[in-house]
Amino acid sequence: MISGGGTGGHIYPAIAIANAWMEKHPDSEILFVGALGKMEMQKVPEAGYQIKGLPVAGLQRSLSLSNLSFPIKLLKSIRMASRIVKEFNPNAVVGVGGYASGPVLFAAQRKKIPTLVQEQNSYAGLTNKILAKKANKICVAYPAMDAFFPADRIAYTGNPVRKDILNLDGKKEMAQAHFGLEAGKKTLLVLGGSLGARTLNQAVLKDMKALNEDGYQVIWQSGKFYFKEMLEKTEASGLKHIHLREFIREMDLAYAAADVIVSRAGALSVSELSLVGKPVIFIPSPNVAEDHQTKNAMAFVNHNAAWILKDDEAVGKLKEKVDELMQDLAIGEALGKKIKSLAKPDAANAIVNELEKLVA
């Protein structure tokens, strides 16, 4: 049983773990448990797995009437999770973070079922810190996580990522054809996540004319919330080298086409970009718990494996940073090699190995 979700950073690693397990144990049965109304309820069935939903929701950090229903939803979710765990009777339960992982792992631990926590970030979330106290194994993506978890139960596995990005060789021409790019032009890839990042969008919007005039072409994922607004503005500009997308499904092609990448610093993005091995400018979101995106980015910046640009400096300074990396090939190549040296390409199988020990 695998529980959690809420964002792609939780869901895609969970699916990667499931796929790696099924490759080795094809006769197994896997059940996902997610939060009703969250994206896992769509993405998990699309990946071919069964999922059940809980009404659990998170506490809002600001004063909100929705917080009044939090304890009711939590208690109901714990009761439902206990019933689901009893009926499915799993050999082990994996929690990947997100609202649903709390009630499910709590129920499994009460029933003495082995549990594994997978922490994607360099700064552990509150739910995982609580659940890890009774978890049999904690799989982490960064070193020095004994600041949050018992050292004797930590496995440094890395974050599982999609298989199609493990090898980008020979995909550049296909990528250029897919996105309508010109061969020979430097390509900037801008990623703000599936929902979008206002700062990144505003930064590209401000600089897109200058980027276009200087001979760059841009693959720009604006995200769902901002796509309509960005589309109207890019179409009005008439700039033919700005290639806007609401969401990019063919991430392997986007990575293959890119010379420089600008991205938020969510756990999944950081792990994927380390495997890609291209020069990266991280612009961490300031709107996340414990500022964990900055901590994720700094884990690479401190090793001279990426650059960082603060969110409040991005609008106005983005092109300057992009120019430096596009024009100084030695710096870009050094960053790409260093970030790739920190990658964990076999993370999903490493987690499966830890699960096998729990159920042996």
Image (spheres, rainbow, N blue to C red):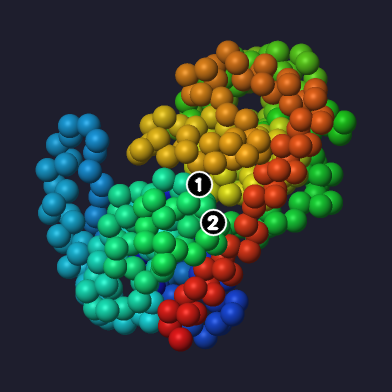
Query: Can you tell which quarter of the image residue 68 is in?
Result: top left
Comparing 90 with 46, the one in front is: 90
Left or right: 346 in relation to 54? right
Kindly tell me whether residue 67 is visible in this rendering.
yes
Q: How many marks?
A: 2
Q: Dot 2: within a 10 Å radius of its alpha carbon, few (fewer than 14), some, or many (20 or more) residues?
A: many
Q: Which residue is mark 2?
A: 159
Residue at the spot 81% in from the left edge and 52% down from the top edge: 169
Amino acid type assigned to the residue bearing label 2 in the image: Asn
Q: Quadrant of residue 206?
A: top right
Q: Is residue 191 visible?
A: no
Q: Which of disc 2 and disc 1 is earlier in sequence? A: 2
Percent x, y for residue 246? 56, 36
Q: Callout 1 environment at 10 Å: few (<14), some (14 to 19), or many (20+)? A: many
Q: Is residue 29 left or right of residue 192?
A: left
Q: Is residue 152 above or below residue 360?
A: above
- Residue under the image location 17 percent in, 54 percent down: 73
Look at 44% across and 75% down and name the residue there.
30
34 sits left or right of 237 in the view: left
Q: Secondary structure at mark 1?
A: helix
In the rendered image, the vertical position of residue 139 relative to residue 107, given as above or below:
above
Residue 17 placed where, x, y %?
A: 52, 66
Q: Position of residue 286 (x, y in %)?
A: 41, 29
Tag 1 residue:
267
Residues 3 and 310: in front is 310
Query: Which amino acid type corresponds to the residue marked 1 in the rendered image?
Result: Ala
Task: State left or right for residue 281 relative to residue 192.
Answer: right
Position of residue 60 relative to residue 211, above or below, is below
Decide: marks 1, 2 in contact (CB < 8 A)? yes
Element on which disc 2 rests: loop
